[in-house]
Image (spheres, rainbow, N blue to C red):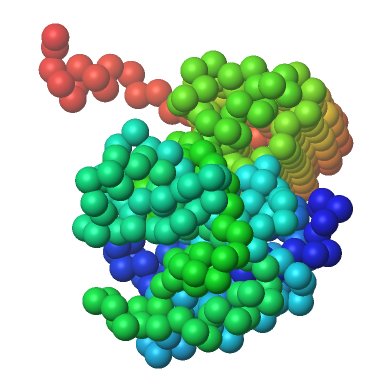
Amino acid sequence: MSNNSKSISVVILAAGQGTRMKSTTPKVLHEISGKSMLFHAIDAAQEISDDITVVLYHQAERIQKEIDARYEGIVYHLQDAEKFPGTGGAMKGVTSKNSQTLILNGDMPLITKDSLSALTSGNADINMSVIKLEDPSGYGRVIIENEQVKEIVEQKDCNEAQLLTKTVNAGIYSVNSELLASYIPQLSNDNAQSEYYLTDIVKMAVDEGKTVTPIYVEEEEFKGVNSKLDLAQAEEIMQRRIKTEWMKAGVSMRLPETIYIDSSATFEGECILENGVSIQGASRIIASHIKTHSIVEDSYIENSDVGPMGRIRPNSKLINTHIGNFVEVKKSTLTGVKAGHLAYIGDASIDEGSNIGAGVITCNYDGKNKYQTIIGKNVFVGSDTQLIAPLTIADDVIVAAGSTITKDVEQGALVLSRTPQKSIKNFFYKFFGKV
């Protein structure tokens, strides 16, 4: 958190219904890189402030519950958006404890600490975010003279000279808190939309001779997410950022544009991610190689390799382990294990030196409850074996291929479970006739 965090309050507007998302999920809870876009905004805000207010209305209880599960100390302002619609209406009744108030939108997940620091710098009465667009069509123009904002003109109201202006409003403001407290009650909804507009505070400030300084920002960071298309585009931008930072930190990626990395995932040491890999949740990967089209979900992997086509499901821990193609591991701890191909390992603990053959499965679920399979050191489990949990196999055991194991196995044993093999002479010819 920056040194000036004590003097800045942040208000995040998250009251909108977001009808263009066409979803029962509140707009601000749609996820980008594994995190709700509102949480991206909160995280950025916490970098510069310890006084954060979130303005809620639509599905307020659901959003507040999600925030409370992740953050502490967030202040909530429940707004009556029916009575006070619009961005200015959302600010009605909001109070700040610090001398400066930064107003953010909950649907701008790409904002960064650097931009927020720029927006809260200096001593202007209002700092206003602006973007220069090559094609500003459809946007209200911000008229700037002598490095000060003079007015915001909607496109339909622009004269020919104003239409040539390429500077538009990015929608974020940092305002002197006393000034904000004075202006918000004065806002009027006497307009075509019958809404209270936050942009009106700029006109009030200019009319009173206050300083309104334009802060030029990058369009990418201030991209609002209003539809599933916007969501997908923001995801691409966020993924590019995440992967760029990890590659700079030493992670090797083959065809990085095909790889997905959750914003909560972390890497240490020399890691390799091949094409099509998906690293989800708060996975922690240390000095490991994740091969083509493998998925890792909320798991810990150290000095191991996975795949190709491996799947590591949540709450798994792999250390010094080889997981081959079409192997699925779920909620299991494997230390020094080899599972080369076509296996399912669920709710299990397997110790070093053990080998899991092709077609092996832990039968961990009886339709009601999940049970544990515990396998000791240097255990060889032959192909096409079913391990019926709850089950403990001691050290130094051989499980013969094609077995169904239902009872615990003692150390040093060979265990097998097979029906006797029969051979009926010349049955082929009796059944099909002579070939």
Residue 186: % across, % down: 49, 84
In which quadrant of the rendered view does residue 350 lie?
A: top right
Q: Nearer the viewer, residue 197 or 369?
A: 197
Q: Position of residue 6 (x, y in %)?
A: 83, 64
Whether residue 147 is situated above or below residue 43 in the rendered picture: above
Q: Image point 36% across, 51% down: which residue? A: 141
Q: Is residue 101 left or right of residue 310?
A: right
Identify which residue, 207 or 314, lies in the foreground. 207
- Residue at 68% in and 73% down: 177
Quarter of the view holding residue 50: bottom right
**Is residue 93 toward the left or the right of residue 19 in the image?**
right
Q: Measuring from the top left, give residue 139's x and y in whole percent.
A: 32, 51
Q: Residue 291 at what x, y percent from top left?
A: 57, 21
The residue shown at (42%, 59%) is 151
Instruction: Please tell me which residue lies in front, 407 or 294.
Output: 294
Viewer can see residue 206: yes
The answer to whether residue 256 is left or right of residue 70 is left
Determine if residue 363 is in view.
no
